[in-house]
Image (cartoon, rainbow, N blue to C red):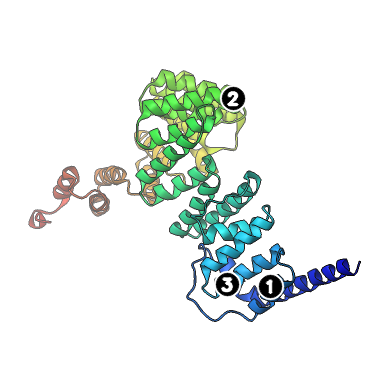
Amino acid sequence: MLFLLSLQGRHLVAGFLTNLAGLALLPRWQAVAQSPALPVCPEESAPSPAARHLDAALRLAPHNERAWLQKGRALWLAGRCAEAADAWQNAVALNPRNAAAWLLLLQAAPETDLRPDPAIAEGIARYALFRGDQARAAEEWERALEWYDRAFSLLPNRTAAGRLEAIYLQRERTEDAIARWEILASLLPDADPDHWWARGRAAELAENWEEAARAYGEGARRAPQPYDFWMRQGVAYERLKDWERAEAAYRQAVAARPDLIWPYLGVGHTLRARQDYTGALDWYRRAEALAPERLDPKYHIGYTYYLQQEYVTAEGYLRQALGINPQHPWSAYWLAKCLYLRGERDEAIRWLGSAIEWHGKEPWNWAVELGDWLAEAGDREGALAAYRQALEWRPGEEGIRKRIQELLPVHSSGE
């Protein structure tokens, strides 16, 4: 009994010393924990006084995982990072379900062969994705990559690979994105639908559309929820201009998720591409009935009526789309075209100018068209301004230069 009381007392004192050390380390450690980046080993410095408390705690209770966790933090802050990793390794050995200790160990020694069990790995990977999302929102791309890479190394799956792809593409590193999907495909068995998703994404990024379509089809046949696979297959067949197979894929997507508008729109697009405007409108209206508040069905109905040269009806739908998103550039563009073809030139010019402003990129061909309309309306200066903007976006385009020369006075034709 005296021995048990003595043992309990030692543990109580060890716990007290560990808590005391944790409070002393807290201000400096919070700065490390809240940093957007993965921790970098600091320069070596004098150890914190908290280290003495932890040494005493571990002498009293050498199997106290919390003391080892705090000891690792004290060593890390002192720049003794290899020793910190050893301390965290002791912590996870004592309690393999200590997610905090695992996270610190894997950050301090990413090359370690030790790995947490799947349940713990999933939690740490989820945290790493969260930190990556924070860095991505702040446009700290390299830091986001570090966190997403950590998540992928712990739990290689479609979610982590997709996050990495988004950053790689933003940084124009397409080959790295392809490589990541290929790694994932190699780690997953053929029976796993995500094996085929990874192969499909790799092929799609490499613009191998036939292979992408095949991979997505294989994945769809294995997936309990195949909607995403059918949609991506439809996109791949669209890139091949294989409208019949694209339509078939989108119809499969409709069957998988009849509550979503996107597969209905997909079927409509394939019919419109084959100039089956009546069939396309039928599918677009099904999408509109599902989501009357959404812009996309109304925009596509309006554009399809434009293609049929039914400009008044097209105008009505395009104005409805602009009522939902008042700065939708494509609705504004086709509305401008409808108005121009109906002879309402001044309003057409205003809408086309707005479409260019809202586009977000450099629609040089729209600027040329605006210049043509302004020149036709007798606004020489406005036309020149539009053409010069188009030439700035598309340097060397001979057709734009010719238009400018035709509008310039003879004495300044050398511009």
Q: How crowded is the residue under tag 3: few (<14 C-alpha within 10 Å), some, or many (20+)?
A: many
Using the rendered image of the protein, determine whether residue 131 is visible from the camera's viewpoint: yes
Q: Quadrant of the N terminus?
A: bottom right
Amino acid found under the numbered disc labelled 1: Gly
Residue 301 point in image, percent of width and height: 48, 29
User: How many discs appear?
Assistant: 3
What is the CA distance from the residue labelled 2 to the residue labelled 1?
53 Å
82 vs 383, nearest the viewer: 82
Q: Where is residue 305 shown, x and y percent of the image? A: 44, 27
Residue that badge 3 annotates: 75
Residue 346 seen from this side: no
**Of the residues under marks 2 and 1, which one precedes in the sequence?**
1
* Proximity of marks 3 and 1: CB atoms separated by less than 8 Å: no
> What residue sits right under mark 2 in the picture?
256
Q: Mark 1 and mark 2 in contact (Cβ < 8 Å)?
A: no
Position above or below: 117 against 84: above
The amino acid type, in three-letter code, at marker 2 is: Ala
Q: Between marks 3 and 1, how big is the CA–CA gap?
A: 13 Å
Q: Earlier in the sequence, mark 2 or mark 3?
A: 3
Dot placed on the residue nearer the N-terminal end, 3 or 1: 1
Where disc 2 sits, the SS reads: helix
Q: Name the residue: 37% across, 42% down.
A: 348
Tell me the mark number nearer the camera, choosing from 2 and 1. Answer: 1
Q: Is residue 314 left or right of residue 4?
A: left
Q: Residue at x 43, y 35 (%)?
A: 201
Tell me where residue 350 appears, x and y as whole percent.
38, 47
Task: Judge whether 267 appears above or below 133 on screen.
Answer: above
Q: Secondary structure at mark 3?
A: helix
Instruction: Identify the residue position indicated by label 1 in the image.
Output: 22
Lateral position of residue 14 relative to residue 336, left or right: right
